[in-house]
Amino acid sequence: MTEKNEIDAVENETGAKRNSDTSNIIQYLSFVLGKEEYGVDILRVQEIRSWEPVSRVPNVPFYEKGVVNLRGAIVPIIDLRERFSLSKPEYTPLTVVVVLQTGSGSHTRIMGVVVDSVSDVISIERTDIQSAPDFGTKVSNEFINGLVSVNERMVMLLDVDKLLLLEVLEQNDY
Amino acid sequence: MKINMPITNNEVVMKSNTILVTRTDLKGVITFANDAFVDISGYSREELIGSSHNIVRHPEMPAAAFEDMWRTLKQNRPWQGMVKNRTKSGDFYWVNANAMPLFENNAVKGYLSVRLTPSRAEIDAANQLYRKINAKEATLHPTGLAAARKFLSEISLGKKLAIACTLLMLPNILLLRELLSSESYLLIGALGVSTLIAFWIMAHVTQSTRNFFVSAVHELFRLSVNEFSPPLNLTRNDQFGDLFRGIYVAGVKLGDDIAQAKQANSNSLRIIQGLKYAECSILITNANSEIIFVNQAAEQLFLRAEKDIQTAIPSFSVQKLLGSPIDIFHNVPALQKEALDKLQDSKTSQFDLAGHTMQLTVKPVFEVNRERIGYVAEWLDRTTEVKIEGEIEHLVRAIKQGDLGKRINLNDKNGFMKSLSTNINELTDVIENVFNDINHIIAKLAEGDLTNSIHSDYQGIYAQCKDNMNDAIVKISEFIIQIREAADFVNTSSQEMASGNNNLSNRVEQQAASLEETAASMQELSSTVVSNAENTKTATVVVKSAAEVAEKGGEVVKSAIAAMQAINESSNRIAEIIGVIDEIAFQTNLLALNASVEAARAGEQGRGFSVVATEVRNLAQRSATAAKQSNELIQNSVQEVRSGTAFVNETGAALMEIVDSIIHVGTIVGHITSASNEQSAGISQVNQAVSQMDDITQQNAALAEQAAAGSMAMSEQAAKMTHLLNFFKINGKSPAAFSAKAKLATSKPAANVQSAANSKVAVNASFDEWEEF
């Protein structure tokens, strides 16, 4: 499995490079947290799943809901709504878990984040991305790469590496 | 020789143990006579004292006896003999007389005569002797041989002894001559000596006997002059000693008697002095009822009354009272001799003595032997007392008879009587004032004048009487005021009642008319009720059919509800199916997204796949949208069905209520039917009642007229009462005000309502006045 992950990570890097080389278009998966729409790089998305009950882990922060067995791999699940203090989480059949992966260096990490719903796969010109303002969002802008307007909607682009790194750092704090 | 005449043959017998004592001077004039002597002699003491003793001499007494007595007395010898004396009234009495001279300083100063009670034998002997002497057949003293014998027997003791001695000597002398002649000298000597010795003893005895008698006689004479301590030789053992001792004992006893007599005398003196100055007036008499003692109080009493008594008894004099017989008050029955003789114990009587009311208490005085020796009379002049008793009685009788104007005269009173009279007068004043005040008030009350009250100051029951009287006047005044108010009120009220009754009468007539209309209306009402009953029967039928229709509606509603429930179930089923579709769409969308992710990861090679995934996702989204819309529609449908079901349920419930209501209406209609029947019966009763009411109304009308007439009569009576009450005059309110109002009241006998109201106002005004009053 470790080998496979490493291969995936290499493929992602090569794919991203290729994308950036071939065109300036980047695909993002957009989802909704509360009333805002967020986006993550689709290449960081491993899988989209519907919500299933999780195995709870003791002595973790309140937004870490537990772990699930994803085809043999133990994946921690966090609820981004609680993580970002956006809204009271509701778990319905339409609740979706987006499984993300990071490729920071040789260390690959997989994590499921709970979102209200998945919107769309959007393709964005790199030039359309605007830098994140210093304020105005409920998410600390250290996770935000930038803002993009799609069909009159504002989509905040999250930096999955930072998001997952932060989780690691915070977990190390424990 | 004094002959006291006349004489009678009545003998006054001396009581035994009585001693009659008199003393005379040397000429026989009486200087003292004891009570017993005065008593038996029949003379008064004044008559006896100073008279010659022969005042009591009886003519049958021989003169020789008195000559003998006087001769004996002149020899300073006591005389003893039986003497017949004469009383003042001529009666006689015998005494055993003992007369003796009284010595003073060895000289005769007078004579004492002590007479004892003689025995009957002695009296008879003396009587016989004196009769013989008076007839010259006998003498008082013996004569002839008897005289010689007496002379011989009375020769002096010494001479007798001398003769006896001489006679005894004679034989001795003769014998001496014989012996001398015989010359026997020895015998002569012996005889001579013995004779001499005998002679000497004889002489000595004679001498001592004579001396003894001389001294004994001397001592006895000394006793007679009250020298009671004879210096006699009491130690002699012979008969002389016995005689001395007898004389001595007699002397000492005599001294003791005299001492006791002196003691008794001083005791008497004290009592006499006490009596003399005692407050009560006391007279004491002797057994002859002669006054022998008058004390000062008695003197004062009689001095005060002397002049008055002298008008009745001219001979009366206070100065001469002592020694007068007690019956000097000859008109006093208690002091008459007969009354006094019968008196055994003290007796009190009251009598009028020359205008003085005397209270006299007489008590006889008895000796130890119950012999009456005098009387004690205690006098009390109750004139003033009786007078004031009379005055008080007179006053009290006057007060009893209601005459309070009389008073006791104070001018002739003093001391206790004056203060008593003053107090009684003051008492009468108080009673008179009280009764005058009450009388005045009640007289005024009788005139109807209640403005007076008692203002005098009294105490106790009088003050209570005064207060009660004043309170009564005040209460009566208040009552009259209240009665006046009440009368006015009654007057006004009766007028109002009269007008009210007139109105009532009119209204009753109107009522009668109304009652007739009512009767007619009742007839109509009766027919209406009958038609009502018929209508209700029709209504009952209609109600029954309506109930059946409603019940059918209820069943229809039930089947509608069942249909609705079926629709609801179908809708739910559809909704579930749509949910499945929606879920499939969601899953499809997720799969498409995953496919898009995979396609993106595949890069250029995955581009076509990406397009397909996008299409799939679009389809999934459309499917989801369609499912959502279907779901919404179904939800709406379910909602509608639910509300329809609710409506139908309500309709069913309403129909059930309608059925119940219709049944209820049927019941009510039944009730209405029976009520209509009852109404019909009730209306006929009402008709009957109305006709009765009609009759009663007619009677009421008559009664109202009578009441009106009665009210008028009452009004007149009230006016009369007000008029009568004006008789009373009360403080602060003149009767005029009432009379004016009374006229006002009586001048409007037929007052209508308006005038009654006016008079009511007037009455209220007058009430206000009264409240201010």
Image (cartoon, coloured by chain):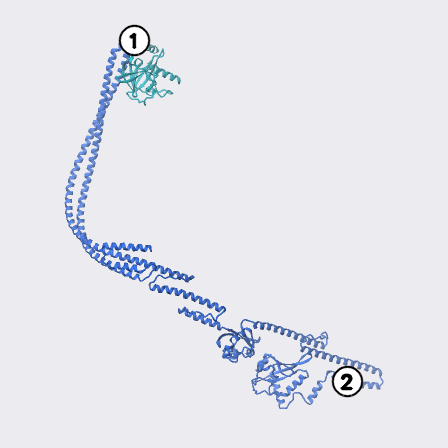
Classify residue B287 as left or right of residue B682. Answer: right
Q: x, y (%) of residue B537?
A: 15, 42
Quadrant location of the N terminus of chain B in the rendered image: bottom right
Is residue B75 in view from this perspective?
yes
The correct choice, above or below, for B720 with respect to A100 in the image is below
Query: Hey, what amino acid is under mark 2?
Result: Thr
Residue B426 found in image quarter:
bottom left
Q: Where is residue A86 in the image (x, y as percent from the top left)?
A: 32, 21
Cβ atoms under marks 1 and 2 closer than 8 Å: no
Residue toward you, B218 or A130:
A130
- A51 w.r.t. B128: above or below: above
B358 lies left or right of B2: left
Q: Which x, y percent locates residue A137? A: 32, 19
Q: Which amino acid does label 1 sit on?
A: Asp
Quarter of the view holding residue A135: top left
> In terms of image quadrants, where is residue B160?
bottom right
Q: Chain A is drawn in which colour?
A: cyan
Task: Provide the residue designation for mark 1.
Answer: A21
Q: Do labels 1 and 2 share a chain?
A: no
